[in-house]
C-alpha cells in the first residue's frame, strides 16, 4: 500500500494513525515554490512513479481525491489503459471557471476526463480518460454547474446498488465521504443520506469480482485526530477486498 499523507499540498501529520498498519511506502516531497499546480505536480510525479512500479493491483491511500490523477498516470506509465469508477458524495466535476470556492479538491474527476490538461495532466504525462469510461457512483451533493455538465456528458452515474463498470480495466476511486456520516464521524465534507459502510464494501467487492480492477485509490477525507476504530476498520476492509 502506498500512503500519500496530504490534503492537496498540506502535509497531514497523524494520518497514518487512522489507517491500517500494513503500509509499504509513504510518499512525501519537498514541494517547490509556485502555484498549487506546480506543487501538486512535484508530489504527484513521485506518486505516479511509485504506482507504476508497485505490485499489481496497487492501493493508494491519501487525504484527498486529487491524488487519483497520480494513480491513473502511474497505471498508464505501467502500460494500463484504465477507466475509472468514482465513489463520492460529491461530483468532483467543477472547473476553475464554475467553482464558487476555487477548491481544487472539487475538480479531480473533471481533470481526469480532459479538462484543461495544461494545469497538471501534461506535467504528469496523464492521458485523459474518455468520459464514456468514467462512472460516478452515489454523488448526491452537486452544484448547479455540475448538474449542467453531467446532463450533457457521456460520463455515467449510478446508485451504489446498480453499478455498471466501464469496459476494460478500471481504477476504483473511493472518497470515504460517500458513506453516510452517521457511520463515519469526522468527515471534512459530510453529506447526509449516503450508503452504509457495508453497502460500499459489497459494491467494491462486486467490482473486484469482475477481475478488471487495475488499482484502488482511497481518499480518507477527514482531519486526522489520533485514530478512529470505525474509520480504520473500513479502510482495512476496503484494502483487503482487493
Image (cartoon, rainbow, N blue to C red):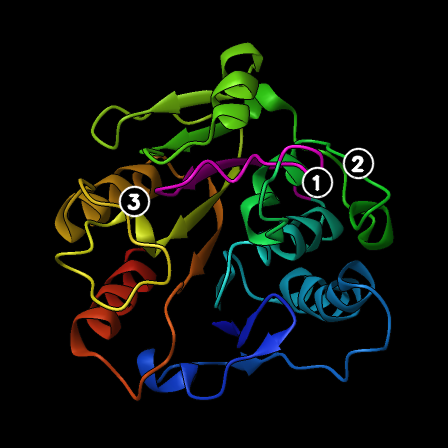
Tell me the quarter of the picture where residue 209 sits. top left
Relative placement, left or right, of 142 versus 81 is left
Q: Residues within 10 Å of mark 2 (few under 14, many from 20)?
A: some
- Outermost residue on the front side: it is 100
Kindly identify the residue that appears in the image at 38 percent across and 43 percent down: 88
Does residue 196 sit above or below 62 in this rendering? above
Tell me the quarter of the picture where residue 4 sits. bottom right
Does residue 62 sit above or below 76 in this rendering? below
Callout 1 touching callout 2 (CB < 8 Å): yes
Camera-nearest label, 3 or 1 = 1
Which residue is label 2 attached to?
A: 116
Does residue 206 sit above or below 162 in this rendering? below
Kindly identify the residue that appears in the image at 58 percent across and 48 percent down: 101
Tell me the quarter of the picture where residue 186 sits. bottom left
Q: Residues within 10 Å of mark 1 (few under 14, many from 20)?
A: some
In the rendered structure, which disc, 3 or 1, sits on the residue that comes first in sequence? 1
Q: Secondary structure at mark 1?
A: loop
Q: Would you say residue 93 sits in the magenta stretch?
A: yes
Q: Secondary structure at mark 3?
A: helix
User: Is residue 185 at least partly visible in the picture?
Assistant: yes
Q: Which residues are magenta?
A: 80-98
In the rendered structure, which disc, 2 or 3, sits on the residue that comes first in sequence? 2
Rounded to the nearest whole Å, what is the CA distance between mark 3 and mark 1? 31 Å
Q: Nearer the viewer, residue 41 or 107?
A: 107
Q: Secondary structure at mark 2?
A: loop
Which residue is label 1 attached to?
A: 96
Give me the disc on residue 204. Answer: 3
Camera-nearest label, 1 or 2 = 1
Instruction: Give the x, y percent position of residue 216.
Output: 45, 54
Amino acid at each position: 500500500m502506498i500512503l500519500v499523507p496530504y490534503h492537496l499540498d498540506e502535509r497531514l501529520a497523524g494520518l497514518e494513525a487512522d489507517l491500517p498498519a500494513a503500509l509499504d511506502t509513504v510518499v512525501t516531497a519537498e514541494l517547490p515554490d509556485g502555484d498549487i499546480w506546480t506543487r501538486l505536480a512535484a508530489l504527484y510525479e513521485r506518486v505516479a512513479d511509485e504506482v507504476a512500479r508497485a505490485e499489481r493491483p496497487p492501493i493508494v491511500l491519501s487525504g484527498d481525491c486529487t491524488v487519483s490523477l497520480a494513480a491513473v498516470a502511474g497505471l498508464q506509465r505501467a502500460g494500463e489503459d484504465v477507466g475509472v469508477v468514482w465513489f463520492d458524495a460529491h461530483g468532483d466535476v467543477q472547473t476553475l471557471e464554475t467553482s464558487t470556492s476555487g477548491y481544487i479538491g472539487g475538480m479531480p474527476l473533471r481533470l481526469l476526463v480532459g479538462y484543461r490538461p495544461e494545469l497538471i495532466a501534461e506535467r504528469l504525462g496523464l492521458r485523459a480518460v474518455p468520459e464514456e469510461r468514467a462512472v460516478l457512483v452515489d454523488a448526491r451533493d452537486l452544484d448547479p454547474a455540475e448538474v449542467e455538465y453531467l446532463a450533457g456528458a457521456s460520463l455515467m452515474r449510478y446508485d451504489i446498488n446498480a453499478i455498471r463498470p466501464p469496459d476494460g480495466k478500471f481504477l476504483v476511486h473511493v472518497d470515504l465521504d460517500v458513506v453516510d456520516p452517521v457511520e463515519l464521524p469526522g468527515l471534512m465534507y459530510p453529506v447526509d443520506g449516503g450508503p452504509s459502510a457495508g453497502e460500499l464494501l459489497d459494491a467494491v467487492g462486486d467490482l473486484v469480482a469482475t477481475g478488471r480492477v487495475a488499482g484502488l485509490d482511497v481518499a480518507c477525507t477527514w482531519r486526522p485526530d489520533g485514530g478512529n476504530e470505525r474509520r480504520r476498520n473500513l479502510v482495512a476492509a476496503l484494502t483487503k477486498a482487493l
